[in-house]
Image: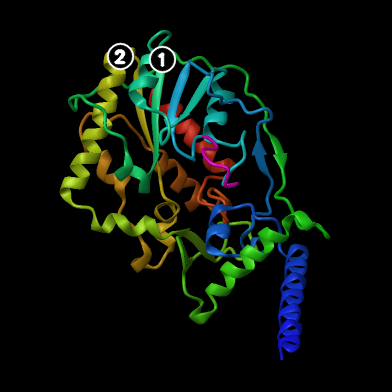
């Protein structure tokens, strides 16, 4: 009897191994955070148009002309392959200005200590960048909610630095190093089989346009479920967000005497909201913040939506929550336009 059980177990293990080996050949390497976390195929949602990348990266922690305190839209804050170094909006900002752009992760950098460090050689501009769904997680600094200067006068423009095009990695057979990745992706995909339901953090919804992405399935949008959480935010939540931004603004003015801007990166579902079903459209946090007086808010959201409305493909990458080359460049230009 046990001999039969052993045979069945060995057969299942061999079938699992064979499935993993086949998957490594058929599934492209995971490139996007949404495909990875949601168990979706790169073959279906991976971008196919070349993207621009600066090599070596132009924005580094050592830059001090412009300092950006931001999340994964500004720099590679985690090793989850969400984005590659050299293709962030901060690199485009450095390329267009010829200035040294420094980037610090808002989630892991104590802001008070960073401002004390920068005070020895203050930057000309500090940009606070936060993704729309992350507004409720802004750190709190002591201080009153008062405005600070928000203009960067006479910003010099150097000759533009060229970015190199690169393609998304494609499957190669055989690649044993990817066996674990392929098995994990298959397991996550199988969890969705009953009814094709959304799982974990990722939701897929139909778009009313089919010309906005270069993927094999341009009529479907992947985005984080968390994008819709703002529907439950209270007036007290919104007041806290505004106060925390202004406290950081006041600290920048008091300690550095630098100009200050706020860049809120629209959630992917916000940027493509006009083309989503009404039930899947999130609250527009940026428009709400824009109504507050004396808040130096960069309206990158308007520039991004103009590109999307015009049919620019991959403003956001189809497999990822972050900007493609076109979106990153538009955000950098929006910061420059506001800072002049």
Q: Is residue 188 above or below residue 162?
A: below
The numbered dot on residue 255 is 2
- Which residue in the rendered view is the most extreme toward the right? 174
- Which residue in the rendered view is the most extreme toward the top? 120
Q: Is residue 43 above or below residue 246?
A: below
Front one among 192 and 98: 192
Read off the residue under disc 1. 118
Stretch in magenta: 75-81
Q: Earlier in the sequence, mark 2 or mark 1?
A: 1
Determine the residue positioned at 19% across, 28% down. 145
Determine the residue positioned at 29% across, 27% down. 248
Q: What kind of element bears circle 1? A: helix
Q: Is residue 233 magenta?
A: no
Q: Quadrant of the N terminus?
A: bottom right
Expressed as whole percent of the image width and height from the top left, the position of residue 137 reads: 32, 42
The image quarter containing residue 245 is top left
Residue neighbourhood size for the residue with mark 2, other residues' Cα within 10 Å, grouped as few (<14), some (14–19), many (≥20): some
Give the left or right position of residue 256, taking residue 212 as reference.
left
Residue 340 seen in this snapshot: no
């Amino acid at each position: 009897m046990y001999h039969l059980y052993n045979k069945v177990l060995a057969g299942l293990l061999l079938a699992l191994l064979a499935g993993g080996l086949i998957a490594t050949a058929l599934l492209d390497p995971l490139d996007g955070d949404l495909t990875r976390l949601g168990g979706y195929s790169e073959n279906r949602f991976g971008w196919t148009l070349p993207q621009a990348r600066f090599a070596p990266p132009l924005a580094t922690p050592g830059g001090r002309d412009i300092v950006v305190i931001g999340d994964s839209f500004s720099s590679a804050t985690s090793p989850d392959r969400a984005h590659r170094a050299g293709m962030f909006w901060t690199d485009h900002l450095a390329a267009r200005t010829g200035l040294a752009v420094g980037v610090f992760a808002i989630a892991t950098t104590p802001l008070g200590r960073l401002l004390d460090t920068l005070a020895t050689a203050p930057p000309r501009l500090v940009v606070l960048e936060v993704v729309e769904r992350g507004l409720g997680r802004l750190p709190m600094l002591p201080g009153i909610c008062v405005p600070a200067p928000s203009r960067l006068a006479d910003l010099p423009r150097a000759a533009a630095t060229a970015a190199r095009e690169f393609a998304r990695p494609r499957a190669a057979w055989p690649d044993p190093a990817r066996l674990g990745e392929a098995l994990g992706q298959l397991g996550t995909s199988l969890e969705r089989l009953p009814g094709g339901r959304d799982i974990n953090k990722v939701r897929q919804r139909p778009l009313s346009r089919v010309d906005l992405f270069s993927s094999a399935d341009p009529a479907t949008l992947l985005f984080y479920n968390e994008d819709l959480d703002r529907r439950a935010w209270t007036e007290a939540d919104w007041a806290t967000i505004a106060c925390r931004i202004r406290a950081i603004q006041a600290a920048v003015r008091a300690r550095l005497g630098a100009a200050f801007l706020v860049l809120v990166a629209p959630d992917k579902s916000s940027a493509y909201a006009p083309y989503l079903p009404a039930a899947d459209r999130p609250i527009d946090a940026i428009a709400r913040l824009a109504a507050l007086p004396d808040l130096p808010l960069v309206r990158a959201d308007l520039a991004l939506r103009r590109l999307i409305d015009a049919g620019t493909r991959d403003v956001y990458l189809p497999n990822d929550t972050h900007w493609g080359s076109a979106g990153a460049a538009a955000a950098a230009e929006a910061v420059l336009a506001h800072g002049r």
